[in-house]
Image (spheres, grey):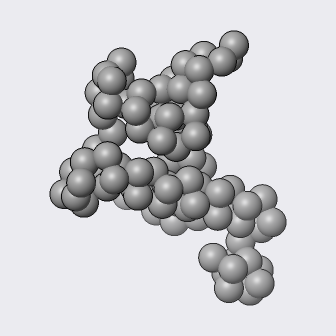
């Protein structure tokens, strides 16, 4: 991504969004591997489950005035994947025939 940024393919905002999403998703994948003891299942635990709460806390989430750690993790996951999806759709979308 750094090479794409230096080459002018990515704007500063796109670069920051994609790098941020990449590092968050890599941390999430590693936390899921630790949680489950293997890399076979990288799906997020069910909303409201103790497993999701444990994962969220492992990722540094905390229950606070803004909501519980599980909700914060799910919201960050949605924001991160939306940034990547928006970039891909905006940059590589093909017109429908």
**Image position, residue 52 (x, y; %):** 37, 30
The answer to whether residue 5 shows anywhere in this view is yes
**At 48% across and 26% down in the image, what residue appears?**
70
36 up-or-down from 4: above or below: above
Quadrant of the rendered image containing residue 55: top left
Where does the N terminus fall, quadrant-wise? bottom right
Q: Where the C terminus falls, by quadrant?
A: bottom left
Q: Position of residue 17 (x, y in %)?
A: 68, 56
**Residue 93 rendering spot, x and y as whole percentages:** 49, 60
In which image quadrant can residue 14 be found? bottom right
Q: Is residue 32 above or below residue 64?
A: below
Q: Is residue 16 left or right of residue 71?
A: right
> Where residue 56 sits in the image (x, y, percent)?
48, 35
Q: From the viewer's perspective, is 50 left or right of 27? A: left
Give me the residue at 50% from left, 34% from top: 57
Check the image and report above or below for 22 versus 7.
above
Residue sticking out furthest to the right: 12
């Amino acid at each position: 991504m750094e090479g794409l940024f230096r080459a002018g393919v990515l704007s500063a905002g796109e670069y920051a969004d994609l790098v941020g999403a990449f590092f968050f998703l890599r941390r999430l994948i590693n936390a899921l591997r630790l949680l489950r003891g293997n890399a076979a299942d990288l799906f997020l635990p069910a909303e409201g489950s103790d497993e999701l709460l444990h994962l969220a806390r492992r990722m540094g989430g905390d229950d606070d005035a803004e909501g519980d750690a599980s909700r914060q993790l799910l919201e960050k996951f949605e924001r991160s994947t939306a940034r990547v999806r928006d970039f891909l759709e905006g940059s590589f979308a093909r017109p429908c025939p």
